Image (cartoon, rainbow, N blue to C red):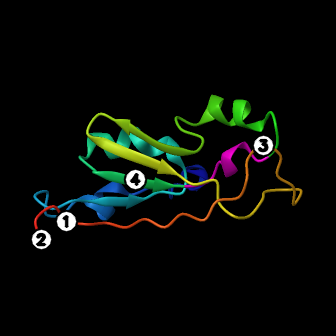
Amino acid sequence: MAGEDEGQGPDFGRALGDRDRARASVLLAHQPVVIDDAVERGVDLQLSGHTHGGQLWPGKYVAALANPTVAGLERYGDTQLYVTRGAGAWGPPVRVGAPPDVTVVELASTRA
């Protein structure tokens, strides 16, 4: 999103434009705030980070003001959004109330 100031924001057309809509799609988007764009484009699953889960108490409340989901899995229409807290930190290498998280996502087809 920061790239938008330089005319280089997300390019959803290039990322999603020529995909086969009959197949499941996963969008890796650093910031969860693009979930509305993902929903509009029929993305099935968006995986994001950026928030660090709030990192320091009461950071999750501040992060919730700017992000639709701070950590975990939520559904927006037909699109699921998963936001990881991540294993690192921003600024001071301290976490309070937002433990680190390394997520393993396993994708499986219902048509096996």
Residue 27 placement: quadrant: bottom left
Label 1 sits on residue: 109
Q: Earlier in the sequence, mark 2 or mark 4?
A: 4
Q: Earlier in the sequence, mark 2 or mark 3?
A: 3
Name the spot of residue 52 as percent of width and height, x first. Answer: 68, 51
- Please tell me how crowded label 4 is: few (under 14), some (14-19), or many (20+) other residues with Cα within 10 Å: many
Asked whether, in this view, residue 74 is left or right of residue 101, the answer is: left
Eye-nearest disc, 3 or 4:
3
Q: Give the residues in magenta.
A: 49-55
Asked whether, in this view, residue 13 is left or right of residue 53, the answer is: left
- Asked which secondary structure carries label 1, the reply is loop
How far apart in space, not on screen, are marks 1 and 4 (Cα)? 17 Å
Residue 30 placement: quadrant: bottom right
Q: Could you say which disc has been placed on residue 46 in the image?
A: 4
Amino acid of disc 2: Ala
- Quadrant the C terminus occupies: bottom left
Q: Earlier in the sequence, mark 3 or mark 4?
A: 4
Q: Are marks 2 and 4 in contact (CB under 8 Å)?
A: no
Q: Are marks 3 and 1 in contact (CB under 8 Å)?
A: no
Amino acid of disc 3: Gly
The image shows a total of numbered marks equal to: 4
Q: Could you say which disc has been placed on residue 30 in the image?
A: none
Amino acid of disc 4: Gln
Q: Could you say which disc has been placed on residue 112 in the image?
A: 2
Q: Earlier in the sequence, mark 3 or mark 1?
A: 3
Amino acid of disc 1: Ser
Name the spot of residue 110 as percent of width and height, x first. Answer: 15, 61
Label 3 sits on residue: 97
- Please tell me how crowded label 1 is: few (under 14), some (14-19), or many (20+) other residues with Cα within 10 Å: few
Q: Are marks 2 and 1 in contact (CB under 8 Å)?
A: yes
